[in-house]
Image: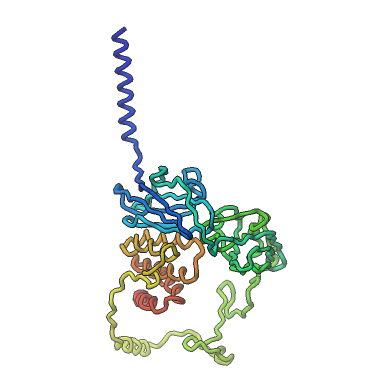
């Protein structure tokens, strides 16, 4: 009897020891910050925490109207990416007298997000709120949306509760029912809240769904989707009866299909309108004689080589003094974390993700300017040139050295 009891206890001890070792071997490494605290002020929520020394990377801050956990994490709003060493962020939530909860997750150097949720460590347990009235406090509500197809267009009608609001009109080939559908949809117009009609000229023969949403809700990530109110649930389709260019101005083709339309009506250097006689007298392309080609080479050989200073990553002035909590502040965090440290591939991914949400035209130009630099250093010259051309409208002087350098590289 004693021998059986001894063998039984030995087997139990072995199982416990084996389970302990197995548990230790299969433990998943999940770094997290600690000591998260929030302080509610009149117009903002101040967040502080203690960084972890287990991994190097960034702290990603998420906001929700309920305590954050693994079940509702997908519906939380990512509001900031903070590099290690800061341990502080000031948030400006969109609505007053609303409970806000926060989570801070670690993102390592390989952009891997460690999803671990520990109350009082990296999750707030108590609600934070603001009391001051803000511009975004009263979102515009869009109702009674209706899309009707005509012969060559689709006419949208709707009502908006806030005439001073800015509305974004989205179009998709599938119903717009959640955030993912919105990211794959096309932003086709920006309207005033005082409008009630919009005419769209899409491609015939395809059913389209529409959504009209307050731009402030898009920028803050607080999406509202109501079927039949601000999103359509029945596709609108223009009958495919012609292959003509519907809804676009008609221009005379200078060459036959399928080549693109080409209308040469202005001088290349001056931009002035050309007279019909000049247009008709443009000579045909022909090869130059060997003597002319030799003379051109001599002329080009006399042009001195211009020594240019090596281009280095450049930070725009508005971004060097970005106010806390602003769009530029979020952009600066990406630049400081990766772009200025030479992690160009990671910086490009984060900038493209940052660009998914509709930004102001100036912020869009800034993103194009930094993507141009990234592609320049990654030796993707064609992509770089395209990005700088998009940035020229706001940052002409800053873009010129990069564009000239790219032209020189492409010519070689």
Q: How is the image coloured?
A: rainbow
Residue 321 left/right relative to 3:
right
**Mark count:** 0
Q: Give whichever of 190, 37 is nearer the camera.
A: 37
Asked where in the image residue 287 lies, by quadrant, the reply is: bottom left
Q: Position of residue 54 (x, y in %)?
A: 30, 47
Q: Give whichever of 316, 43 is nearer the camera.
A: 43
Q: Give above or below for 336 relative to 297.
A: above
Q: State the residue at coordinates (50%, 46%).
A: 72
Q: Position of residue 363 (x, y in %)?
A: 46, 69
Q: Position of residue 131 (x, y in %)?
A: 51, 58
Asked where in the image residue 116 lies, by quadrant, the reply is: top left
Quadrant for the N terminus in the image: top left
Q: Residue furthest top?
A: 1
Q: Give above or below for 392 relative to 93.
A: below
Q: State the residue at coordinates (70%, 66%).
A: 241
């Amino acid at each position: 009897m004693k021998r059986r009891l001894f063998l039984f206890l030995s087997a139990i001890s072995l199982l416990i020891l084996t389970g302990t070792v197995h548990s230790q071997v299969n433990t998943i490494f999940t770094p997290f910050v600690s000591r998260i605290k929030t302080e509610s002020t009149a117009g903002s929520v101040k967040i502080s925490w203690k960084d972890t020394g287990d991994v190097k990377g960034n702290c990603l801050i998420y906001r929700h109207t309920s305590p954050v956990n693994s079940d509702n994490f997908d519906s939380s709003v990512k509001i900031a990416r903070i590099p290690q060493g800061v341990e502080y962020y000031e948030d400006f939530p969109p609505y007053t007298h609303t409970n806000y909860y926060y989570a801070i997750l670690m993102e390592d150097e390989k952009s891997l997000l460690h999803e671990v949720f520990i109350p009082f460590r990296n999750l707030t347990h108590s609600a934070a709120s603001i009391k001051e009235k803000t511009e975004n406090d009263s979102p515009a509500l869009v109702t009674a949306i209706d899309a009707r197809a005509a012969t060559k267009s689709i006419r949208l009608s709707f009502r908006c509760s806030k005439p001073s609001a800015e509305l974004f009109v989205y179009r998709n080939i599938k119903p717009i029912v959640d955030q993912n559908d919105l990211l794959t949809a096309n932003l086709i117009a920006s309207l005033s809240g005082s409008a009630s009609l919009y005419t769209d000229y899409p491609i015939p023969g395809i059913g389209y769904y529409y959504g009209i949403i307050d731009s402030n809700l898009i920028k803050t990530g607080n999406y509202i989707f109501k079927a039949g109110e601000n999103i359509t649930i029945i596709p609108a389709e223009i009958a495919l009866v012609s292959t003509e260019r519907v809804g676009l101005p008609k221009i005379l083709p200078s060459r036959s299909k399928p080549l693109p339309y080409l209308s040469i009506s202005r001088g290349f250097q001056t931009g002035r309108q050309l007279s019909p006689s000049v247009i008709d007298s443009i000579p045909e392309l022909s090869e130059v004689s060997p003597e002319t080609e030799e003379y051109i080479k001599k002329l080009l050989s006399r042009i001195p080589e211009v020594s240019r200073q090596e281009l280095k990553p450049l930070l725009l002035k508005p971004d060097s003094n970005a106010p806390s909590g602003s769009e530029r502040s979020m952009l600066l965090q990406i630049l400081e974390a990766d772009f200025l440290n030479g992690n160009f591939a990671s910086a490009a991914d984060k900038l493209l993700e940052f660009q998914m949400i509709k930004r102001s035209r100036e912020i869009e130009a800034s993103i194009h300017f930094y993507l141009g630099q990234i592609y320049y250093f990654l030796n993707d010259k064609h992509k770089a040139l395209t990005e700088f051309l998009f940035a020229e409208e706001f940052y002409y002087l800053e873009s010129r050295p990069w564009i000239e350098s790219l032209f020189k590289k492409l010519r070689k």
